[in-house]
Image (cartoon, helix red, strand yellow):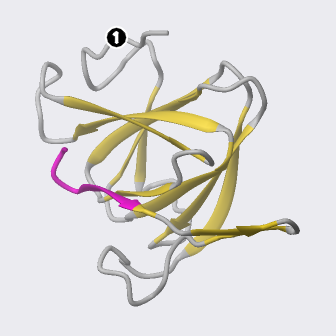
Amino acid sequence: MIEGVHLTPLRVIADERGSVMHMLKAGDPSFAGFGEVYFSTVKAGKRKEWRLHRRHTSHMAVVVGTVRFVLAHGSTSPDGPTVEVEIGASNYQLLTVAPNVWYAFENRGIDTAVIANCSSGQHDPDEVERRGFENPPTTYVWRD
């Protein structure tokens, strides 16, 4: 795994009426503070661009669908190591991404996926760096 990236198995409590999907508690070892919670949707077969947060930690769980995240530490060279993580409702885990880690993601399912993100800080356009797929921070090649 890349420094600053952690996967934590999450608990799902299900019965015939539905389920409760735990995500994050203030007492969890990976909890880095609260700034905002938001939900990101990704349409089937689509990817979202590379991003790196300079100060914020992201705690993400995929509550609908399956999403592949690709991560690379911000201090590595373009040929540095990358890690793939695929999580979703059937592999329910919390992905914690510390500051200075690049990540991009794609929906691996046939329906729109939903990612819940509890960020340690509020949105600040000056705090995040973005790169399109034409200018990636790594030589990673997306595969099917």
Residue 75 in the image: state x and y as whole percent: 13, 41
Task: Kindly identify the residue that appears in the image at 48 percent across and 83 percent down.
Answer: 25
The residue that label 1 is drawn on is: 141
Task: Please give the range of residues in magenta.
Answer: 1-8
Residue at screen point 36% across, 77% down: 32
- Taking depth in this image into account, of 40 and 21 the one nearest to the observer is 21
Q: Tell me if residue 88 is in the magenta stretch.
A: no
The amino acid type found where label 1 is placed reads Val
Q: Residue furthest right?
A: 17
Left or right for 129, reference 81: right
Q: Is residue 80 left or right of residue 84?
A: left
What residue appears at the point 28 percent right and 26 percent down from the top-left corner? Answer: 137
Depth check: 137 or 22 in front?
22
x then y, percent, for residue 119:
49, 67
Split into 4 quadrants, where in the image is the N terminus?
top left
- Figure quadrant of residue 79: top left
Total labels: the figure holds 1
For residue 2: magenta? yes
